Image (cartoon, rainbow, N blue to C red):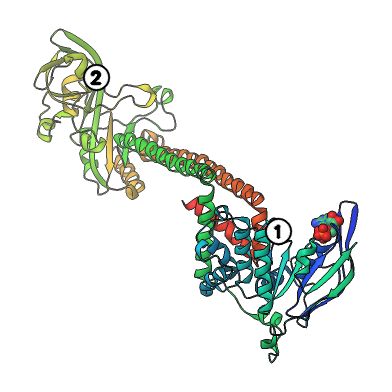
């Protein structure tokens, strides 16, 4: 079954190299029970590892059932190990967190034989552990653990069992038990290759090979091998090796579920560490949500403040937009708007509503209280345009506007200064000595641009302000609400044409009025808040990344810590891919949890 020719193996560590095997020739028949003996360091384990396909020889040929397998790639060797070889180690190497049954099932999972799980039960029964199936390794004696390891080695019906000092860690009674099991397996036709340094143990085998300094020095056969083992393969044209290598396998749901189950077991196995690594992601995700929430909140707040400025608003104002301020006051032409202008504008198709404005300062008197503030004459449409419906009382109506009625709506600061906590509604106040009736109080808006108190104002009908309070014949400005945002450009054009026509403007005087577009300011501010949200989002993303790196670190540590487990899994047939998937699934489960 196995033929080795001129096998060599050299270990290199740094500059020093050591030849552990120096040309080993060996033939092993099916059904043999071979014990490999020799002093420590003679190369027994190295030879066993090469025979068991755990390691590759540097030179020479390794022929298994007629097929050269010495230099096959890792994944193919893993597949062969899984199907052809069963391992029993001195240290048992069971997965500590899993039950005897799960440990025994492991090779089935890697070998794509998960439908044969009932076999694990049979094998455990066969080694006399029917009552121990659901116990974990730490609840079992050394001998029992080693029997689980043997059941695991047998579960895929391998051709050869490789045992490395299988009784090295056991008491005399367990030692006899284990050797009994191995002998029984051999009589049933299994080929067994065992490394031992104890003569009594070796005496139970049928053939003893002695090694020294990397060579076989003695080979004595005491009994002929049992012949039954491979006879069933006799008529097959394909060798067992070829059959295994050509079997196709893909990742199926069942396999995925197995990996998932193992991942969950591993995570539950180290709860504190898993919880701590989850904490990182938890903080990361919480940060993302909190930052996004804060960003959105800030945006909403700013938007609501902006909406008090009004949306889709244009303000028509006297004076040049090229020479604002000083230049225009110093003699530049100014178009003065009239009430008739306002009426004409109101009739434009793109305009929803207008509010002419006429303001000035005024001295307020109520009872024995005095207060100086800004008086704003506005149109009836003002509350709707500025989202500023009175908090109590009412705004003036069209009729009152037309009749220049002396009614006033107070800003909350003014109301407080003049009336304290008392309700000002219905009371009479004097503005610049003219009596007005208080009909409403405006909602509180807080500080506006430049820290100005927006509540320190009084609103009256613009007609009243113009004709009764300030004696003006022109309006100061006209606020125009455009029907929808898309019409703003068109509305600007219409307004310009209208004013130019009505005031017969040309040349220089074309610049004698200006249209201020609030939506531009709003867009700028909205853009700024977007930038702020983005910034917050980036900060949060960084914390999420840090959380992720945390998980990565923990996984890396757990890979390092579990090298032994990974080694065992590979020995029983896991490929690189299987190990990778297992750890990836663990990381993903942690993250999702
Ligand atoms: P045995 O099992 O007979 O005690 P081994 O096969 O384990 O001997 O080792 C044979 C020799 O090879 C020993 O001298 C050992 O130090 C050396 N050796 C084994 N494995 C390695 C390795 N991975 N790297 C370097 N040297 C090794």
Residue 517 in view here:
no
Where disc 2 sits, the SS reads helix
Name the front one of labels 1 and 2: 1
Across and down, in percent, residue 572 comes to 65, 66
Q: Going from the N terminus, do you reach mark 1 or mark 2 first?
A: 1
At a point 61% along the width and 64% down the height, the residue shown is 147
Residue, x 51% and y 73% (percent of image)?
118
Task: Measure the C-alpha gap from mark 1 to mark 2.
Answer: 89 Å
Q: Position of residue 54 (x, y in %)?
A: 74, 66
Disc 1 element: loop
Where 493 falls versus 428 (above or below)?
below
State the residue lying farthest toward the top.
Answer: 368
Query: Circle 1 sits on which residue?
Result: 90
Q: Does residue 130 appear left or right of residue 377 in this picture? A: right
Viewer-proximal residue, 448 or 338?
A: 448
User: What is the number of the mark on residue 413?
Assistant: 2
Q: Position of residue 278 (x, y in %)?
A: 50, 45
Which corner quadrant of the figure contains ligand 1? bottom right
Front position in the image: 383 or 269: 269
Q: Is mark 2 within 8 Å of ligand 1?
A: no
Of the pair 275 and 412, the residue shown nearer to us: 275
């Amino acid at each position: 079954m196995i033929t080795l020719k001129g096998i060599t193996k050299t270990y290199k560590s740094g500059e020093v190299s050591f030849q552990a095997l120096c040309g080993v020739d060996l033939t092993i028949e099916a059904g043999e029970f071979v014990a490999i003996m020799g002093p420590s360091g003679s190369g027994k384990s190295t030879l066993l590892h090469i025979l068991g396909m755990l390691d590759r020889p540097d030179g020479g040929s390794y022929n298994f059932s007629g097929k050269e397998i010495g230099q096959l790639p890792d994944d193919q060797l893993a597949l062969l190990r899984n199907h052809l070889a069963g391992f029993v180690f001195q240290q048992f190497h069971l997965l500590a967190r899993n039950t005897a049954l799960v440990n025994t099932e492991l090779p089935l999972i890697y070998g794509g034989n998960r439908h044969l799980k009932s076999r694990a039960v049979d094998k455990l029964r066969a080694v006399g552990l029917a009552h121990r199936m659901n116990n974990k390794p730490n609840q079992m004696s050394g001998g029992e653990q080693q029997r689980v390891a043997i059941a695991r080695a047998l579960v895929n019906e391998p051709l050869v069992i490789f045992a490395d000092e299988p009784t090295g860690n056991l008491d005399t009674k367990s030692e006899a038990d284990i050797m009994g099991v191995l002998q029984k397996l051999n009589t049933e036709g299994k080929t067994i290759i065992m490394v031992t340094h104890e003569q009594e143990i070796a005496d139970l085998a049928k053939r003893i090979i002695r090694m020294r300094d990397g060579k076989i020095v003695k080979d004595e056969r005491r009994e002929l091998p049992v012949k039954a083992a491979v006879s069933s393969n006799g008529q097959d044209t394909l060798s067992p090796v070829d059959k295994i290598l050509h079997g196709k396998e893909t990742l199926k749901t069942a396999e995925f579920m197995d990996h998932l189950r193992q991942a969950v077991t591993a995570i539950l196995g180290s709860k504190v560490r898993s919880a701590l690594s989850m904490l990182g992601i938890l903080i990361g995700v919480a940060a993302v949500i909190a930052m996004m929430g804060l960003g959105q909140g800030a945006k909403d707040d700013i938007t609501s403040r902006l909406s008090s400025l009004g949306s889709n608003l244009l303000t028509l104002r006297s004076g040049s937009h090229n020479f604002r301020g000083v230049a225009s006051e110093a003699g530049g032409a100014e178009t003065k708007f009239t009430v008739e202008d306002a009426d004409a504008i109101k009739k434009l198709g793109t305009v929803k509503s207008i509010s002419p404005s006429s303001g000035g300062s005024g001295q307020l008197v109520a009872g024995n209280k005095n207060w100086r503030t800004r008086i704003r004459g506005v149109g009836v449409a003002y509350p709707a345009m500025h989202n500023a419906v009175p908090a109590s009382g009412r705004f003036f109506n069209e009729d009152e506007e037309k009749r220049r009625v002396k009614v006033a709506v107070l800003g909350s600061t003014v109301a407080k200064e003049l009336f304290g906590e008392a309700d000002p509604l219905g009371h009479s106040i004097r503005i610049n000595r003219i009596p007005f009736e208080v009909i409403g109080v405006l909602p509180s808006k807080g500080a506006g641009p430049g820290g100005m108190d927006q509540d320190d104002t009084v609103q009256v009908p613009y007609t009243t302000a113009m004709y009764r309070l300030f004696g003006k014949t022109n309006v100061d400005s006209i606020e125009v609400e455009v029907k929808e945002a898309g019409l703003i450009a068109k509305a600007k054009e219409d307004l310009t044409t209208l004013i130019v026509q009505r005031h017969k403007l040309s040349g220089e005087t074309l610049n004698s009025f200006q249209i201020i577009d609030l939506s531009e300011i709003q867009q700028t501010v909205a853009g700024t808040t977007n930038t702020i949200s983005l910034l917050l989002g980036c900060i949060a993303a960084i914390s999420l990344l840090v959380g992720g790196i945390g998980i990565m670190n923990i996984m890396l540590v757990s890979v390092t810590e579990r090298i032994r487990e990974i080694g065992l899994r590979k020995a029983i047939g896991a490929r690189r891919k299987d190990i990778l998937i297992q750890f990836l699934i663990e990381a993903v489960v942690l993250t999702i949890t």
